[in-house]
Amino acid sequence: MQLTNRAKKTDKSELSLFERSYLPSLATGLGITIKHFFQAKPTIEYPEQKRYLGPVFRGHHILKRDEEGRERCTACGLCAVACPAEAISMVAQERVKGEEHLYREEKYAAVYEINMLRCIFCGLCEEACPKQAVYLRHDMFVPVFIDRSDVIYGKDQLVEDMTHRYKRDAWTKEDAMKLWK
Amino acid sequence: MGSFVQWLIESMFLWKALIIIVIFAITLAIAAYSTWGERKVAAYIQDRRGPNRAGWGGLLQPLADAGKMFFKEDFIPAQADKWLFILGPCLSMFTALMSSAVVPFGSSFIIGGKEVFVQAIEINIGILYVFGVVSLGVYGVMIGGWASNNKFSLLGAIRAASQNISYELAMGMSIIAILMMSGTLSVREIVLQQHGGNWNIFYQPLGFLIFTICAFAECNRTPFDLPECETELVGGYHTEYSSMKLGFYLFAEYINMFASSAVTACLFFGGYNYPGMDFVERQLISGLGANAGHNVATLIGIGSMFTKILFGIFFFMWVRWTVPRFRYDQLMNLGWKGLIPLAVGNLIITAIAILSGYKLVGIWVGLALMVVLISIVWSLRPKKKNAIMGA
């Protein structure tokens, strides 16, 4: 069965004297390598150059706010239940009068922590969330940490900054297809 | 005291010492940057960029590598012969550094009315000296392999020894053809006879081919790097070595590459000669005066020599990243059944051509006749049934 037309039948016939000297095939080989030597390199110099990873890349977590700047999270704990690595933990608190401009729901997460050493960036929290509060950003990596005290991310690192709102490039498959054009 | 200083300046001693130190430094620098070049060439041939983090374009990489080597644990196995174990890499490095002593890197500088050759020592048996020192080089490998008290090291050392012996024969015979043409053993004389573009490569194409192949084998470079064949012998003769002792072995390889490129340039590519050198020197002398003009012309000659050397080193690397390693029986077949008969044939043809009086034409006609003869014999050989390739 032929899968591709790249297969080459090997020639097992006896070599001629010229071929036995190995010089012609050596010259061919040297030609191929020197051609590659002068070819443009496809390398992307990573820390300086970053390539676009697509709208569905799962990077740094974010706790979204709504249009009025209120936190969407209601501390239902579904993300923590969904998390296969058990990286998420939270402490719920009831909203009191006067905090309506801070929290959208009547209950909110007073503490919301993600252990980045445990997180496997699967995105199940994002799928589990009924309030569309937790997302994995497509445009930002979790930075390298060099100390264990830097590992657990609290609300200060997770809640969205209203001056730099997170916007995903494409939400639907159709939008994503347009991006690649 | 004053007369001693006077004597120092008047004698060649000071200038010679200066030239030796400069050549020593350049050899080390080129060897160090060959490691960087090797990695860059490897990377570019494999469509990568190579080391580019340490310094601009990775130019500080050799320093970083050396620093790493120095700070590694200097380990000597308990069962090893301690003194021989230390002697091995030292000998390897020592002989590698000695071999470029007779190579003329340029013609001469005229300083204070004295002519100073750009060469560490001018001896009339230069080629023999190079050969002797290069042959000594294998002792470093052998002693290291033996002293390690490790079967892989020993096998690597044995391979190195037998390989060097096999290929030195063919190499020697290809050089004898050159010596017959030049009639001298002095490297400077051989270079002088190739004045301008009258290079030996045009007279000795086959000799050059044999010499190059043997130089690869003598330097233990791919496709002949069987002594350190890591797929079969872990690390070959330097399996047990670490730290700067390993560094010395690796460094010696690069110095050997430099030296053999230099010798190849001198024997076959006219050393510091380049086409149109007389015209350039005349122009410079008429422009700058006799002494300064001559000195600048010498500098240009040195430049041409180093261009050839650097291309030679590049060729070593280019081949390394193209050709896979030979099997051991293939190596021996090529050496004994291929190169030595060819070298003998080349020797005979050269002799006949010199005696006939038509050197250039004679050699080319002779080589053509030899190719015809070999192909006739080849076509008449008894055909084997189910012949195994390369057997």
Image: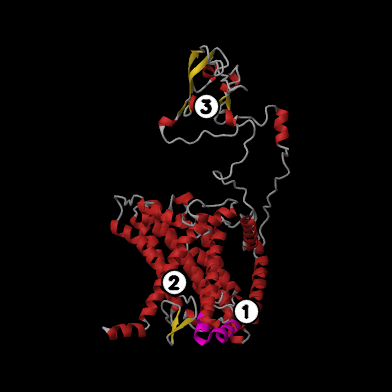
Residue B278: % across, % down: 58, 84
**Chain ID of residue with mark 2:** B
Q: Nearer the viewer, mark 2 or mark 3?
A: 3
The residue tagged with tag 1: helix, strand or loop? helix
- Kind of residue at disc 1: Ile
Quadrant for residue B88, please give it. bottom left
Checking the image for residue A158, the label placed there is 3
Residue drawn at point x = 55 percent, y = 57 percent: B41
Marks 1 and 2, the one that precedes in the sequence: 2
Per the image, the residue denoted by label 2 is B100
- The residue range painted magenta reads B278-295
- Kind of residue at disc 3: Leu
Residue drawn at point x = 70 percent, y = 27 percent: A172
- Kind of residue at disc 2: Ser
Per the image, the residue denoted by label 1 is B363
Q: Is residue B120 visible?
A: yes
Say if mark 1 contacts mark 2, CB within 8 Å.
Answer: no
Asked whether residue B285 is drawn in magenta, I would say yes
Residue B52: % across, % down: 52, 52
- Please say if A170 is above or below B114: above
Q: CA distance from mark 2 to mark 3?
A: 65 Å
Side (left or right) of B329 relative to B94: right
Q: Nearer the viewer, mark 1 or mark 2?
A: 2
Say if mark 1 contacts mark 3, CB within 8 Å.
Answer: no
Residue drawn at point x = 42 percent, y = 86 percent: B112
Judging from the image, the colouring scheme is secondary structure
Q: Residues within 10 Å of mark 3 (few under 14, many from 20)?
A: some
Q: Nearer the viewer, mark 1 or mark 3?
A: 3
Side (left or right) of B363 relative to B83: right
**Chain ID of residue with mark 3:** A
The residue tagged with tag 2: helix, strand or loop? helix
Asked whether residue B385 is drawn in magenta, I would say no
